[in-house]
Image: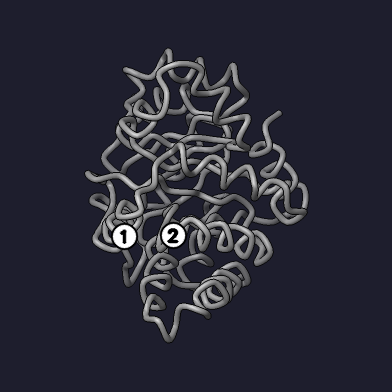
Amino acid sequence: MTRITQTFEKLKAEGRKAFIPYITAGDPDLATTESLLLALAEAGADVIELGVPFSDPMADGPVIQRASERALKNPVGVAEVLPMVNRFRQHPAGRDVPIVLFTYFNPLMQFAKDKVGEKLKAAGIDGVLITDLIPEEAESFVAEMRAAGIDNVFLIAPTSTDERIKLIAEHSSGFVYVVARTGVTGVRDNVSVTVSDLVERVRQQTSLPVAVGFGISTPAHVREVYGYADAAVVGSRLVQEIENNLDSTQLPNLVARVAQLARELKLAV
């Protein structure tokens, strides 16, 4: 049983839902990211999505694109991210919080062509979400990850047919990620009115926990998502908070402010 599965089973037994924050590794630098990981864990994150910066982030909106641009100036890739995750695992707060590596296929292939799963697992990664990997081309990759004990998380879009939802679910483990709206990530004023219907369609195809993301930005959004899903993913709003505190006068408070925002979102229910 993976750390992600254990987390969702524990939450279900306690009658709770999962709060999943996202941050981009290396934004504004790796040392700050490491501090943010610990702060998010201490703020009550149930799972953390850690984005690998990429030059062509097709699924990401302007906020996360800018975060990737800042991180790539360092530069930061999978090879730099993994030692940081390993250090995070040495802290008491970081031992039990699952980390899902949110990336595109190219950075992983640049990192290593062989034994990728073993290397990710050794560093403390629990799951991978490869945004541009489609299930029709994922057989060997999924098999390698499963052999290493790493969960594969796939995205389900509002445009997905029932047949495709079933295919995605068959390739998924840990949880499935339902995209709340078509388009890219970003802060939104409201959650799509159709997402609850999409979650219900997903539940007809799989018993895996269902997380909802893309546009979840406020405590009210989190409360709404918790009404029909097992987890809420908040990314752009947290990354925006990082961006809001990059000024030299704000930088010393960046980690504390992001952690406070995460705490407010976590305590929405």
Q: Looking at numbered disc 2 in the image, what kind of residue is underneath it? A: Asp
Provide residue 154's location: percent of width, then percent of height.
42, 34
- In depth, the one of 19 and 108 nearer the eye is 108
Residue tagged by mark 2? 29
Residue tagged by mark 1? 70
Give the residue furthest to the bottom. 249
Residue 193 seen in the figure? no
Provide residue 264's location: percent of width, then percent of height.
57, 75
**Secondary element at tag 1:** helix
Name the image quarter holding the C terminus.
Answer: bottom right
Label 2: how many Cα within 10 Å (few below 14, some 14–19, many 20+):
some
Residue appearing at x 42%, y 54% in the figure: 24
Tally of numbered discs: 2
Provide residue 67's location: percent of width, then percent of height.
33, 60
Label 1: how many Cα within 10 Å (few below 14, some 14–19, many 20+):
some
Name the image quarter holding the N terminus.
Answer: top right
